[in-house]
């Protein structure tokens, strides 16, 4: 082999490492390009997920509450962002005693304090739209609709959908309940600040204890009104005909969830002069039956002014005077102790009741005899004067 051939072989051997290195470099470059392409594809795929838009919607709702539009954004490539103004529709129905704005305001407070979760509920393959239902805990409160502006495939099997939010519909998804309110007919009830119409009265019952009083003055019935379709706890207030607020008790029906509100006739503080008057009237009535009122043995005139004209109590007193008063043993030193007037209840400005308690003591020879009274007296005003209409 001559020198020229040896030189060619030597040059050929020296070129082979360079070709191999060049080929290896090209492979590495292609792998880097492929890895960068794969990385970019994964970034684009991750950014295109609906969760990213829903997270942005949650942040906006938590920050701003329910408004006409919700601002959301998403990243298309991990860096650049696209913003959306999503129209909000409030689809909430209320009865006449609840306000949609109150529900929206309360919901906004809850959104700022609780985490929002989403579940895909429907998918329209024809339009490409997907609906996600939003929850606060177990409470559903909105539907979010995402639409597709198109899709592309990368890495052969990786489909990247260009999702965009289209609408948010806020609703109220909870069981409703009804309420019954029972009040005296001459009182007025308000629910959530609105006066209840008399047209809603479902029943009206007279007060049995006031049957005798109704013979002398007009007595209000006990009426019940029913209101349907409440979502939130109702604020029920009742006032008497003088505008004074009355105590309202609430009872819930665990089975149906319905609620009962009841209000009794008002029981204000009893004026001291009225307290003294009724106590004196009750004690005079007691004195009559033990012949401690002057003229009691002759007629019922000493107690006639205590009762309305024609009262059955006057008839009974006259019968007692004629038939039984003579058996009363002679006694002295009649006194009243442990006097108490309580349970003052006002039915109208012309009718009230109260409980009167006292002990009457009498001396019969060397013995002290006591007679206890504990009764509810019902008073009516006739011709400007208070009279005893009934005693229980």
Image (cartoon, rainbow, N blue to C red):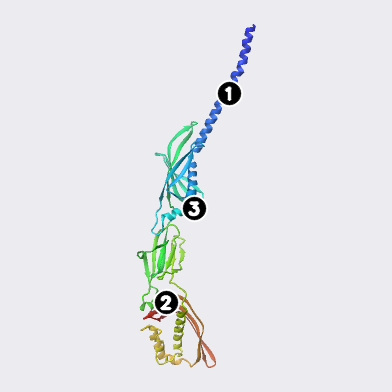
* Mark sitting earlier along the chain (1/2): 1
Specify the label residue 352 is tagged with: 2
Q: Position of residue 390 (x, y in %)?
A: 41, 80
Q: Nearer the viewer, residue 368 or 287?
A: 287
Q: Position of residue 215 (x, y in %)?
A: 36, 78
* Mark sitting earlier along the chain (1/3): 1
| Cβ atoms at labels 1 and 2 below 8 Å apart | no
Q: Position of residue 328 (x, y in %)?
A: 46, 91
Q: Quadrant of the C terminus?
A: bottom left
For residue 174, above or below residue 275: above
Q: Is residue 379 visible?
A: yes
Q: Which residue is mark 1?
A: 25
Few, some or many residues within 10 Å of mark 1 (<14, 14–19, 20+)? few
Q: List the single residue furthest toward the top.
A: 2
Tag 1's secondary structure? Answer: helix
Q: What is the quadrant of residue 389 in the picture?
A: bottom left
């Amino acid at each position: 082999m001559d020198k020229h051939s040896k030189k060619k072989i030597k040059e050929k051997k020296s070129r082979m490492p360079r070709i191999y290195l060049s080929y290896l470099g090209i492979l590495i470059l292609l792998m880097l390009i492929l890895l960068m392409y794969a990385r970019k594809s994964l970034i684009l795929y991750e950014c295109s997920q609906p969760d990213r838009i829903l997270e942005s919607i949650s942040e906006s709702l938590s920050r701003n509450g329910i408004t006409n539009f919700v601002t959301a954004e998403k990243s298309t490539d991990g860096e650049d962002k696209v913003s959306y103004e999503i129209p909000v529709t409030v689809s909430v129905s209320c009865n006449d005693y609840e306000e949609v704005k109150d529900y929206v305001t309360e919901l906004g407070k809850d959104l700022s304090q609780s985490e929002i979760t989403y579940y895909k509920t429907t998918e329209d393959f024809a339009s490409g739209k997907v609906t996600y239902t939003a929850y606060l805990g177990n409470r559903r409160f909105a539907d979010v609709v995402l639409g597709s502006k198109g899709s592309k495939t990368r890495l052969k099997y990786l489909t990247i959908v260009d999702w965009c939010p289209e609408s948010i519909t806020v609703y109220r998804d909870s069981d409703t309940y009804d309420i019954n309110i029972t009040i005296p007919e001459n009182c007025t009830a308000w629910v959530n600040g609105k006066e209840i119409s008399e047209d809603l009265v479902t029943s009206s019952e007279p007060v049995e204890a006031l049957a005798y009083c109704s013979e002398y003055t007009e007595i209000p019935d006990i009426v019940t009104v029913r209101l349907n379709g409440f979502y939130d706890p109702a604020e029920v207030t009742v006032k008497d005909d003088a505008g004074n607020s009355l105590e309202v008790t609430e009872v819930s029906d665990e089975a149906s969830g319905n609620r009962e509100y009841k209000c009794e006739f008002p029981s204000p503080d009893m004026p001291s002069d009225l307290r003294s008057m009724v106590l004196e009237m009750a004690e005079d009535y007691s004195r009559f039956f033990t012949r401690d009122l002057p003229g009691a043995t002759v007629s019922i005139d000493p107690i006639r002014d205590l009762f309305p004209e024609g009262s059955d109590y006057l008839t009974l007193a006259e019968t007692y005077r004629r038939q039984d008063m003579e058996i009363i043993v002679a006694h002295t030193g009649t006194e009243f102790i442990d006097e108490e007037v309580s349970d003052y209840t006002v039915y109208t400005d012309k009718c009230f009741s109260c409980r009167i308690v006292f002990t009457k003591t009498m001396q019969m020879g060397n013995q002290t005899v006591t007679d206890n009274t504990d009764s509810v007296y019902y008073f009516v005003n006739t011709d400007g004067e208070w009279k005893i209409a009934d005693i229980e």
